[in-house]
Amino acid sequence: MLNIKVLGSGCANCKRLEENARKAVEALGIEAEIEKVTEHAEIKKYPILATPGLVINEKLVSAGRVPNETEIAGWLKV
């Protein structure tokens, strides 16, 4: 099962990113655990300069922007 983490404080962009990730998982019909990481110390473990961030199986794939559902689905297929 995939592990997806949304890094951020819980701002509007963070919520949009989480929503897009959930839609991508649903569209692909795959199983994934989606977690929100809001703890600053946890976020700093990743090479991220700006939130929101998206981590798939411990690999940072996006930071500082909100990728759309299609883009996220592409990362999930790999």
Image: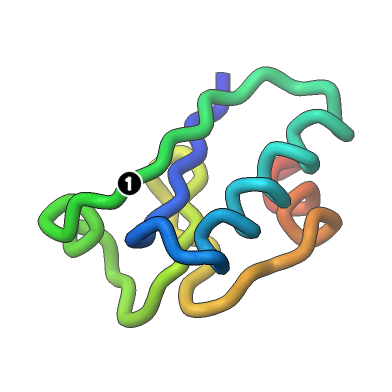
Badge 1 local density, few (<14 within 10 Å), some, or many (20+)?
some
Q: Residue 48 versus residue 38: which sits nearer the camera? A: 38
- Residue that appears at 45% across and 65% down: 11
Q: Residue at x 56, y 68 (%)?
A: 13
Rendering coords of residue 65 (x, y %): 57, 77
User: Height in image: 11 above or below 73?
Assistant: below
Q: Is residue 73 left or right of residue 60?
A: right
Q: In this view, does 72 lie to the left or right of 45?
A: right
Residue 38: x %, y % from top left? 28, 51
**Residue 14 in the image: above or below residue 42:** below
* Tag 1: amino acid: Val
In this picture the colour scheme is rainbow
- Residue 49, located in which quarter of the rendered image? bottom left
Determine which residue is flagged by label 1.
37
Residue 61, x across and y down, in percent: 53, 62
The image quadrant where one finds the C terminus is top right
Depth check: 51 or 70 in front?
51
Is 43 displayed left or right of 29 in the figure? left
Give the residue at x 47% y 72%.
63
Name the element at disc 1. Answer: strand
Q: Residue at x 32, y 72 (%)?
A: 48
Quadrant of the rendering where the N terminus is positioned: top right
- Given residues 38 and 49, the one toward you in this image is 38
Q: How many labels does the image show?
A: 1
The quadrant holding residue 47 is bottom left
Q: Residue furthest front?
A: 12
- The foreground one among 28 and 8 is 8
- State whether residue 78 is above or below residue 28: below
